[in-house]
Image (cartoon, helix red, strand yellow):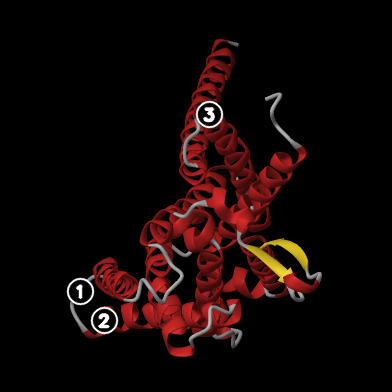
């Protein structure tokens, strides 16, 4: 600990800041996936956007953030549309259709990454698992670094910050419509609200969030942050606003607890955050069952007292 320098603290702050934004963004869109029973779709998009990133790079020859996001969003929407179309025109169940499409797209993405490894700045293990510890070393530079340009910090941090602002702004702006489409789809149709539009709007947010989370947690672990904090919040939430706030709170607890565990064990930070999110869910389930038993015991005792009186 005595060898810890100010530079080490700054690197840690960038890592924790990036992880916090990734977890919060995933938790917010994850709430709507849980409530709409589309958790598997989030899993599908988080994997299939790899194909979008690779194709965007190969077609444009640029690793610009906007081009990567555009490619990922397009493939994310195609994944959603193709999964639903396959379900409608065949006898396949919805989860089977989703499984077929996203594994196909993800496999194509992995093949392209392995074929063009020399041209694509993507590592297969990094894509799958992410490596948030390396995030501070890929920095965004304002101007020419050779002529006094300024380093603004990790690219991954600024990308997920932009996406986080977009996600929060979208939820605030369209809160009532998203709420109506999620809980009362029939009422939404009668009010002239397009369910399809808001469905694909939500899938666009999911696609952007998963792409922005790639550097930090990878395609597999991002699913944990999409689903687990939102599922934990679902256990206690009394309203949609309450669930959104609780999901963000759970996500931040998972980040701090996971980072502390990774620091102590010298293990993977992203995996430790995902495990922490799972442990928080289990603790919440245990606390909820304990509370229900105490309530049952209390009412039983109260009933016995009234009958005795």
Seen at 38% across and 66% down, the residue is 47
| Alpha carbons under labels 1 and 3: distance apart | 39 Å
Nearer the observer, 278 or 197: 278
Q: Residue 2, relative to residue 131: is it above or below?
A: above
Q: Estimate the spatial distance between the alpha carbons at disc 2 and disc 3, rounded to whole Å.
A: 41 Å
Mark 1 vs 2, N-terminal side: 2
According to the image, label 1 marks what residue? 92
Q: What residue do we see at 50% from left, 25% from top?
A: 290
* 88 left or right of 222 in image: left
Image height of 8 relative to 86, above or below? above
Q: Helix, strand or loop at disc 3?
A: helix
Task: Report if residue 172 is visible in the image.
Answer: no
The residue to which callout 2 is attached is 86
What residue occupies the far top of the structure in this picture? Answer: 308
Which of the 4 image quadrants contains residue 159? bottom right
Which residue is under mark 3? 287
Q: Are marks 1 and 2 in contact (CB under 8 Å)?
A: yes
Residue drawn where x is 79% and y is 73% of the image: 147
Gap between marks 1 and 2 measured at Cα: 7 Å
Residue 193: x and y in percent read 59, 84
Residue 61 x/y as whole percent: 48, 86
Crowdedness of circle 1 by 10 Å Cα count: few (<14), some, many (20+)?
few
Question: Disc 2 on helix, strand or loop?
Answer: helix
Q: Are marks 1 and 3 in contact (CB under 8 Å)?
A: no
């Amino acid at each position: 600990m005595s060898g810890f320098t100010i530079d080490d603290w700054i690197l840690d702050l960038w890592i924790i800041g990036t992880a916090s934004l990734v977890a919060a963004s995933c938790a917010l869109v994850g709430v709507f996936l849980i409530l709409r029973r589309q958790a598997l779709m989030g899993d599908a998009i988080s994997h299939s956007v790899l194909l979008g990133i690779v194709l965007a790079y190969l077609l444009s020859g640029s690793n610009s953030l906007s081009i990567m996001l555009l490619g990922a969003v397009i493939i994310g929407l195609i994944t959603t549309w193709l999964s639903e179309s396959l379900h409608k025109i065949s006898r396949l169940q919805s989860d089977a259709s989703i499984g077929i499409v996203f594994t196909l797209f993800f496999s194509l993405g992995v093949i392209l990454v392995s074929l063009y490894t020399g041209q694509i700045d993507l590592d297969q293990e990094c894509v799958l698992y992410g490596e948030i510890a390396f995030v501070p070393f890929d920095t965004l530079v304002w101007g020419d670094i050779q002529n006094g340009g300024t380093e603004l910090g990790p690219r991954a941090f600024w990308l997920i910050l932009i996406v986080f602002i977009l996600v929060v702004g979208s939820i605030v702006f369209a809160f009532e419509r998203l709420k109506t489409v999620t809980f009362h789809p029939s009422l939404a149709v009668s009010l002239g609200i397009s369910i399809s539009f808001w469905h694909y709007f939500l899938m666009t947010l999911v696609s952007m969030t998963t792409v922005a989370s790639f550097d930090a947690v990878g395609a597999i672990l991002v699913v944990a942050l999409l689903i687990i904090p939102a599922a934990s919040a679902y256990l206690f939430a009394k309203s949609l606003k309450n669930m959104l706030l609780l999901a963000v709170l759970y996500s931040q607890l998972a980040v701090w607890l996971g980072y502390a565990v990774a620091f102590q064990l010298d293990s993977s930070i992203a995996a430790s955050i995902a495990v922490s999110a799972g442990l928080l869910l289990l603790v919440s389930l245990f606390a909820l069952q304990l509370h229900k038993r105490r309530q049952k015991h209390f009412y039983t005792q109260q009933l016995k007292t009234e009958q005795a009186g």
